[in-house]
């Protein structure tokens, strides 16, 4: 994947609550270009694979249950310093600790149901983008 890209998911809680538009507006206003996007639903196998790094954590079962309960919006975003800047834009994992104005502060419910995912490295962004999109679906 090209440099300066990150991968995101608007999680089932955000989609259920009708926050797709509000979150995308903030993403666009923050200077990210949408490279790929779709509404999709993860299977149990998808979620277990995507979050395999957490499979020993106590919240793993809950996380898989949550991420598969409804549709998500998967997207690839482009901007200079995309991975780091997007993590700043979404805020801390726990919305109670997220900075004012961040997407999680505004739209997340709890540490588990926190509205949005952001890749934590360029390497993982490429892996996660390829998990959801073929090369032909990235523009
Ligand atoms: P993400 O990968 O979704 O962008 O979130 P993150 O880096 O901020 O947090 P991470 O440590 O990678 O955790 C992945 C997701 O697992 C759920 N979680 N639940 N109940 C809990 O204590 C707990 N901790 C984490 C969240 O959905 C978190 O985003
Ligand atoms: Mg993470």
Image (cartoon, grey):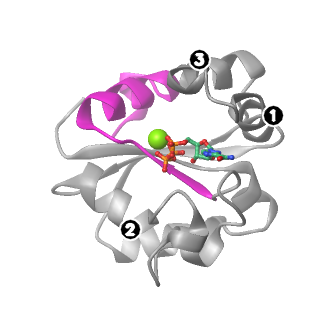
Task: Residue at 49% x, 71% y: name it.
Answer: 98
Q: Are marks 1 and 2 in contact (CB under 8 Å)?
A: no
Q: Is residue 23 above or below residue 35?
A: below
Residue nearer the viewer, 47 or 95: 95
Q: Position of residue 70 (x, y in %)?
A: 81, 43
Q: Residues within 10 Å of mark 2 (few under 14, many from 20)?
A: some
| 93 lies left or right of 137 | right
Between marks 2 and 3, how big is the CA–CA gap?
A: 26 Å
Q: Are marks 3 and 1 in contact (CB under 8 Å)?
A: no
Q: Residue at x 34, y 30 (%)?
A: 124
34 relative to 38 in the view: left or right? left
* Residue 38, quarter of picture: top right
Pick whichever of labels 3 and 1 is earlier in the sequence: 3
- Is there a contact, CB below 8 Å, between mark 2 and mark 3? no
Identify the mark at residue 89; answer none if there is no mark: 2
Helix, strand, or loop for circle 3? helix
Instruction: Estimate the spatial distance between the alpha carbons at disc 3 and disc 1, rounded to whole Å.
Output: 13 Å
Instruction: Name the residue rendered at 65%, 56% in the picture.
Output: 111
Q: Which residue is mark 1?
A: 65
Residue 63, image quadrant: top right
């Amino acid at each position: 994947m090209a440099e300066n890209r990150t991968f995101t998911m608007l999680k089932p809680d955000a989609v259920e609550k009708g926050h797709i538009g509000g979150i995308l507006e903030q993403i666009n206003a923050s200077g990210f270009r949408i490279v790929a996007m779709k509404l999709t639903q993860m299977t149990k196998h998808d979620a277990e694979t995507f979050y395999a790094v957490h499979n020993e954590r106590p919240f793993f079962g809950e996380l898989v249950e949550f991420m598969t309960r409804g549709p998500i919006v998967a997207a690839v975003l482009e901007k200079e310093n995309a991975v780091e800047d997007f993590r700043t834009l979404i805020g801390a994992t726990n919305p109670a600790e997220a900075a004012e104005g961040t997407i999680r502060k505004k739209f997340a419910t709890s540490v588990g149901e926190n509205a949005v995912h952001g890749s934590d490295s360029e390497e993982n962004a490429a892996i996660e983008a390829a998990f959801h999109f073929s090369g032909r679906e990235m523009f």
